[in-house]
Amino acid sequence: MHYRLGYNVAVFDADFPQHSLMKMKTRDLAMVMENEALKKLAYKQFTTINKKAYPIMQHKADSVLDAAHEFVNTSPVPLDVLFFDLPGTVNTPGILKALAGMHHIFTPITADRVVMESTLIFTQLLQDVIMKKAKLPYKALTCFGTRWTAGKAHPYMTCTISLLDNWG
């Protein structure tokens, strides 16, 4: 979105304690700075599109919405899209408040019984708690499959699609 479509994007990594997006950014930046060929490629990319790399900021779930509002209000570049990487458990302090502030929620799902059941419980919680609050900005909940084998039928996914369709 940022590099190919021209959208101004920012990412908030609130997946404590992993903060995998911040670690990836730090690792990638170190690799570029240590390699002259990568430096040249990065320079060419950023000058061609006339954009810097999109920012990735680390926060905890209980403060991420406030940090996002502050960033949007002080950003010298108008932002089109904010992405949030949040913890995968509702037991994290502040996670429900953070989810309640989202317009679109994307949740990964895999063809694994334990993961599938966990995702369904999480999705039901969102349906029952967050979606029913009329004044929230919420617009959509989307489950997306990860690590699927092409062409292989997955009975858990069929069941999940059926359940999600019934929820509306």
Image (cartoon, grey):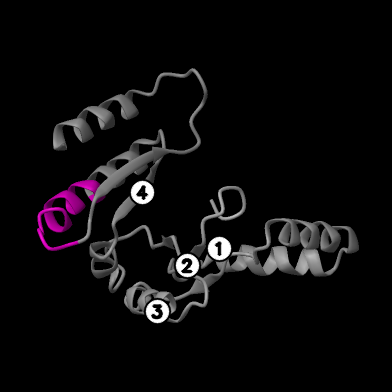
The residue indicated by pointer 2 is: 13
The kind of residue on which mark 2 rests is Asp
Is residue 2 shown left or right of residue 133? right
Which element type, helix, strand or loop, lies under badge 1? helix
The residue indicated by pointer 1 is: 21
Q: Which mark is residue 73?
A: 3
Q: Which mark is residue 106?
A: 4
Mark 3 touching mark 1, by CB under 8 A? no
Q: Label 1: how many residues lie within 10 Å, few (<14), some (14-19) or many (20+)? A: some
Q: CA distance from mark 2 to mark 3?
A: 19 Å
Q: Label 4: how many residues lie within 10 Å, few (<14), some (14-19) or many (20+)? A: few
Q: Nearer the viewer, residue 98 or 55?
A: 55
Q: CA distance from mark 1 to mark 2?
A: 6 Å
- Tell me which segment is drawn in magenta: 122-136
Earlier in the chain: of badge 2 and badge 4, it is: 2
Earlier in the chain: of badge 3 and badge 4, it is: 3
Residue shown at the point (83%, 63%) measured from the top left: 39
Query: x%, y% of residue 31?
Result: 78, 64
Earlier in the chain: of badge 2 and badge 3, it is: 2
The kind of residue on which mark 4 rests is Phe
The kind of residue on which mark 1 rests is Leu
Q: CA distance from mark 3 to mark 4?
A: 25 Å
Mark 1 touching mark 2, by CB under 8 A? yes
Q: Label 2: how many residues lie within 10 Å, few (<14), some (14-19) or many (20+)? A: many
Q: CA distance from mark 2 to mark 4?
A: 15 Å
Q: Answer whether residue 126 is magenta in the image.
A: yes
Which element type, helix, strand or loop, lies under badge 3? helix
Q: Label 3: how many residues lie within 10 Å, few (<14), some (14-19) or many (20+)? A: few
